Image (cartoon, rainbow, N blue to C red):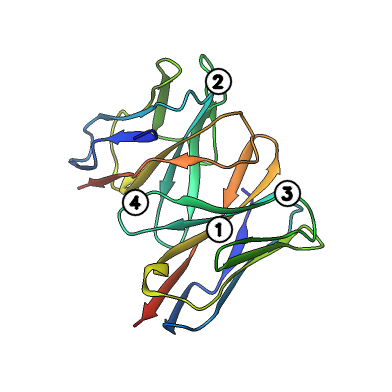
Amino acid sequence: NAGVTQTPKFQVLKTGQSMTLQCAQDMNHNSMYWYRQDPGMGLRLIYYSASEGTTDKGEVPNGYNVSRLNKREFSLRLESAAPSQTSVYFCASSGTFGTSYGYTFGSGTRLTVV
Amino acid sequence: GQQLNQSPQSMFIQEGEDVSMNCTSSSIFNTWLWYKQDPGEGPVLLIALYKAGELTSNGRLTAQFGITRKDSFLNISASIPSDVGIYFCAGQLNFNKFYFGSGTKLNVKP
């Protein structure tokens, strides 16, 4: 089925470990986004990529890096995980940067940092 | 960052009842979106609103873009158990980003 695929679905890390969250979309969308979701705080934008070859910071970029590998793939890296990064991470894509048609979201990665 | 105030935070209702929830902001938005998130899944777009005063329906769901452009409302009529989930509003401030409310968790008792 067409959509946004995130891997892994669950991950437990120790403080200081690093990991990369993967995201791929097969809808030929230009723009991709990474959000984190914390209880009572809704979705907050970490980084986004308006088009292949560009990336920009969102609301909460500290402690993260991203790579837009190609048009399909947008990865999020935690270089040195901290307990404050325990969250559910969602990748999303949209056809046009700033489109009013909204985003298509993946099913999320649940990350726990102990 | 921008703040969207979404209320209520949670609701417990009986099957068949109507539901209302809203989002307000101190900023003027160009677009309002409403999403539903099922447990363990990502949000799914329900309704998109593009101009002030617009009223749009999607089945039993109706949403309105407030006249002031600072608020939006979502109504669900005759609720059913599968309406359970978290409902998020999202506002587009400028052309490049959406800001999300903190969600309304809906529980429906059969």
Camera-near label (2 vs 3) is: 3
User: Subunit of mark 3?
Assistant: B
User: Would residue B71 be found to the left or right of residue B68 on screen?
Assistant: left
Inspect the image, locate mark 4, and give the three-letter code of the amino acid beneath it.
Glu
User: Comparing marks 1 and 2, which lies closer to the viewer?
Assistant: 2
Three-letter code for the amino acid on which mark 1 is drawn: Gly
Separation of marks 2 and 4 at Cα, in angstroms:
25 Å
Q: Are marks 1 and 3 on the same chain?
A: yes
Q: Observer-nearest residue: B102 or B61?
A: B61
Q: Residues within 10 Å of mark 1 (few under 14, many from 20)?
A: many
- State whether discs 2 and 3 lie on one chain: no
Q: Which mark is residue A51?
A: 2
Co-location on one chain, circles 1 and 2? no
| Mark in front: 2 vs 4 | 4
Quarter of image, res B95: top right
Residue A1 at x, y percent in the picture: 34, 35
Identify residue for label 1.
B101
Which amino acid lies under the numbered mark 2 shown in the image of this protein? Ser
Same subunit: marks 4 and 1? yes
Question: Which sits earlier in the primary sequence, circle 4 or circle 1?
Answer: 4
Separation of residues labelled 4 and 1 (CA atoms): 17 Å
Mark 1 or mark 3: which is in front? 3
Q: In this view of the protein, which residue sits in the foreground, B4 or A32?
A: A32
| Residue under label 3 | B50
